[in-house]
Amino acid sequence: MKVASRVKRGSLESTVQGLFISAPYPGDQKFFGQPTGLLYALSVLADRKLQKTSSKEIVSVEMPVWAPAGVTDFSNSKLKEELTDYITEHRPKVVGISTFSASYQNALAIKDLVKKIAPETLVVFGGAHEDNFVKHYRKNDRIDADLVVAGDGSHLLDAVYSIVESNPHATVEEIKQNIYSRREELESLPGTGLLLLETKTGIESITTNAAEHKRLRKQTLLGALPIMPRYLLQNEDEVSSGFDIFQNPKEENLKTAQVMVGQGCPYACAFCSEGIGTVWYDDDAPNAREPRRSIEHLEKELQELKQEGYEAIFFDDSTFFAKPKKYLAEVLDLLAKYEFRWGCQTTQKSIHAMKEFLPKMREAGMDYVYIGIEHYSGEIRDNFGKNVRGGVKVSGNVEHTLSMLEEAEVSVGISLTFGHPDTNSPTQSTTETLASARYAIDRTKELIQMYHNVVGVSCNLVTYHPGTPISEMFEREVGPVDYTGLPNQSAVYAQFEEGMGPHAAGLTDSLVNFIANYAAEKFGKKLWM
């Protein structure tokens, strides 16, 4: 990873050097693209610095964001070498690490390296894993970093950074004391953020918007935040060119921005960490009631993206189509105006609800949709609640969905998941068998042959993540879950995106090996693993 050279800092000369890292996936794969959550978390801080300096270049040197590719062995990786050189030379006072559960071991390794070289660097953990892991920290009465930020982190991170800037030579313990002494100030910040810090007497929590009853606290909406600061990304063009679904006539990947219109998902699939059934912190609901950004705020971002040379957009919304029709029509008008090619992920149900818009979507530049079929077994789908909320199951309408998208000339990616736990079983073992897995793969192969707009199939193993309905049920009725230890590290599991994480009993090595090999045989180059 190339590190930006120093620039003259001017008025930032006396301020704090930071470094923010999206912890890499533990293998050859990675969650490619722009770390939208981390960039939004830094948006308020970056905007404050930009207002002070009027220079994106200065701010990007002062608080760069690294989004490295997957790392199989951190101890012998190029990333470790680059990080060692950077910490040794720049001595950042604050290192923030954003992590998923799957990348948590690499987050810990990064923290340990930072502390070995610069013990008085403040290490802050955040990200999707931390959002839903708070109750486990509280149960263990310890955290794995100097600070943990969960939930709405944008204003909290800015406030913490300001406290560090007020005394940049303070020790980590002094910084933590300074933070706790300004607790009331932090509790007055907006949103539903949470800060954890470890003291001599145990874990202390600081909750933003603390004066409100927790059930009345509202998330900070994306439209109330500055545009995510993509300019902080080191090697921004490289990080933004990983979507091979958007290519020019020379088959070169287009510079693609990941954009969010809203937060959360209105559905409640039991295995998913983004739906309304997810447990955030302890029992707070994670999604805002009115999460959509204003059209004016979105247009400002599209204008900026055009100026920065972006040609395509992938919407990171969990279900992009699940918006009011009037609002979606206005979004399509914007996309047509600025002539972006774009794609999104959504559900079959929302596609059917918005079928009248498909021609307009295609005219507005839509190239691609990613949908979760997940499984064809009615029993399994009922068990994990796919598309049941709101009343209509659509597993029997897969052909209709693909036919509508083919007619609209839209490419499709399909998600299949294997190993769903049987929540009616005392052990919550999976009901997946060789026969059910074979059927799912054969059925999908038939769809590929029928509908040539299917460009890829992602095969995944259902994984327990903190806060999801299946995880909460397992912990409640069976026992604890090892979310961070990567309990399935054999090569057969490593082929899957989150295969090394915890799975239901009964998802055996032989069954996983069959799924991987049979999918490779049937899907060929269209297999995404």
Image: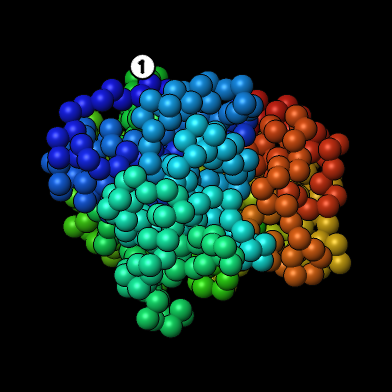
In the image, residue 250 above or below residue 127 = above
In this rendered view, identify the residue nearer to me: 414 or 403. 414
In the image as oriented, which residue stretches furthest toward the top? 250
Q: Is residue 116 visible?
A: yes
The picture quadrant where one finds residue 272 is: bottom right
Which image quarter holds the N terminus? top left
Q: Is residue 317 left or right of residue 503?
A: left
Q: Determine which quarter of the picture holds residue 356.
A: bottom left
In front of the other: 453 or 315 = 315
Q: Residue at x 75, y 50 (%)?
A: 503
Residue 330 relative to residue 283: left or right:
left
Q: What colouring does the structure picture have?
A: rainbow
Q: Is residue 374 above or below residue 471?
A: above
* Residue at 15% over, 40% down: 11
Residue at 43% across, 83% down: 213
Q: In the image, what residue type sits under mark 1? A: Lys
Give x and y (percent) for residue 501. 70, 45
Residue 138 occupies quadrant: bottom right
- The quarter of the picture where the C terminus appears is top right
* Crowd tier of the residue under label 1, counting other residues whose Cα lies within 10 Å: few below 14, some 14–19, many 20 or above: few
Left or right, 104 with reference to 227? right
Above-or-below relation of 407 to 6: below
Relative image position of residue 177 (x, y in whole percent) = 42, 61
Q: Which residue is mark 1?
A: 250
Residue closest to the eye, 116 or 391: 116
Which secondary structure lies at badge 1?
loop
